[in-house]
Amino acid sequence: MSSASQSKILLIVGTHGDEDIGLEIVKKLKIFPGIKKGDFDVLVGNPRAIKKNGRFIEADLNRVYPGKKDSPVYEEKIAWENLNTARQYDYVFDLHIASKSAQSFVVIPKREIHNPKMVKAVVIDKVVLWPSTSGRLTGPICQFLDNSLEIEFGTYGKTREQAVAKAVQITAEAMRNLLVGSNQTKKETFSQQVFLVYGKFLINGKKSELKLDDFQLATLNGEEYYPLLTNQYLTEGIKCYKMRLANSGL
C-alpha cells in the first residue's frame, strides 16, 4: 500500500490493558531523533482494557484473532476491526512487556519465519517461534499477518524509565532499518538465535522453587530445554514454557 520511497509501519500497543507502557513508548517515539511524523501510525489494541487498567474486558485479545465482525464479545469484535486495519500496512509491530523477563525477545506465532527482513531489522538477539500447540484456530494478530511480529520487552530488574528508554531505542532502530535500509552498524557482528516453543512446565498449582532463567539451558528428569517466561504465569500453574533451539543463527 505504500509508495516506492516510503514503507508504512503500524505499531500496536495496549493489546493487554495492564501493559500501558506501550503508550509511553509511542509518545517518546514521536519526538525521537531520526523518527519523522508519518513514519508510523499507532493502534491501541484494547482501549477499554487500557482505560480499566485490566488485562482484558471479556476475553484475552491476544488469543481471539481473527475475531468476529458481529460478535457480542468485545475483544472478538475489536480483533476483527484491528486485523482489518493492520492489513493496510507494510509492517506491523505488536509491542508487549514481559515483566518477569530480564531479556527482550521477538515472538513470531508461527512455525517458521516468513519475513526475515523484518526480523533482522529488530536488534534483539532472541527470536521465538511460537505456533499453536493445541490446534486452536484463534490466536495473536501476528498469527494472521506474515508482515508482522511481536516484541516482548523484558522489564525485570529495570525501572520503568529504563525499560521505556530501551524499548524506544529498539523500536526506533527497527523502524529506521526498514524505512531507510539494512542495519549498517550491526550487519557484521549481529546474529539472532531462533527458538521453538514446544510445551509447558506445569506445576499443578504448587509454586516450584526450581531455579530457572529464560533462554538458559535447563535439565529436568533427563529433558533438556530452554525456559521462557519463567514465573510469569505461576497463577495459571505454569512455571515456564519450554523451547528448543531451532536455529543457531539468523
Image (cartoon, rainbow, N blue to C red):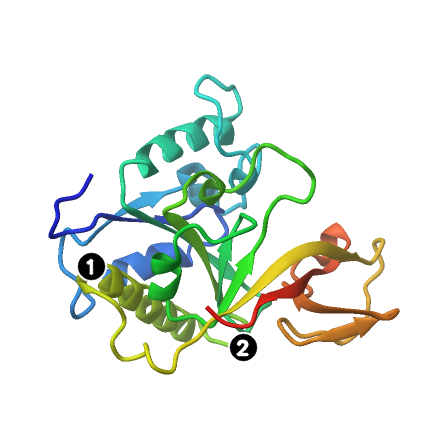
Quadrant of the image containing the N terminus? top left
- Residue at image position (39%, 58%) is 116
User: Is 112 left or right of 134, judged from the image as shown?
Assistant: left
In the picture as drawn, the residue positioned furthest to the top comes out as 70
Task: Estimate the x, y position of residue 18 in percent, counting from the top left.
Answer: 50, 51
Classify residue 125 as left or right of residue 11.
right
Q: Amino acid at mark 1?
A: Leu
Q: Quadrant of residue 227?
A: bottom right
Of the residues tagged 2 and 1, which is closer to the observer? Answer: 1
Q: Residue at x 42, y 52 (%)?
A: 149
Q: Could you tell which of marks 2 and 1 lies nearer the N-terminus?
A: 2
Q: Secondary structure at mark 1?
A: helix
- Residues at marks 2 and 1, CA–CA distance in whole angstroms: 32 Å
> In percent of the image, x 69 and y 54: which residue is there?
198
Residue tagged by mark 1? 179
Residue furthest to the bottom: 189
Describe residue 195's horizontal placement relative to residue 52 as left or right. right
Q: What residue would you read off at disc 2?
A: 157
Q: Secondary structure at mark 2?
A: loop
- Can you tell which quarter of the image residue 51 is in? top left
Q: Is residue 208 above or below residue 6?
A: below
Given the image, on which type of amino acid does mark 2 rest?
A: Gly
The answer to which of 159 and 100 lies nearer the viewer is 100
Q: Nearer the viewer, residue 202 or 164?
A: 202
Neighbourhood count class around disc 1 (C-alpha, 10 Å): few under 14, some 14–19, many 20 upward: some
* Residue 223 position in % (x across, y down): 82, 68
The vertical placement of 151 against 249, above or below, is: above
Dots 2, 1 in contact, CB < 8 A: no
Question: x, y percentage for residue 191?
Answer: 44, 75
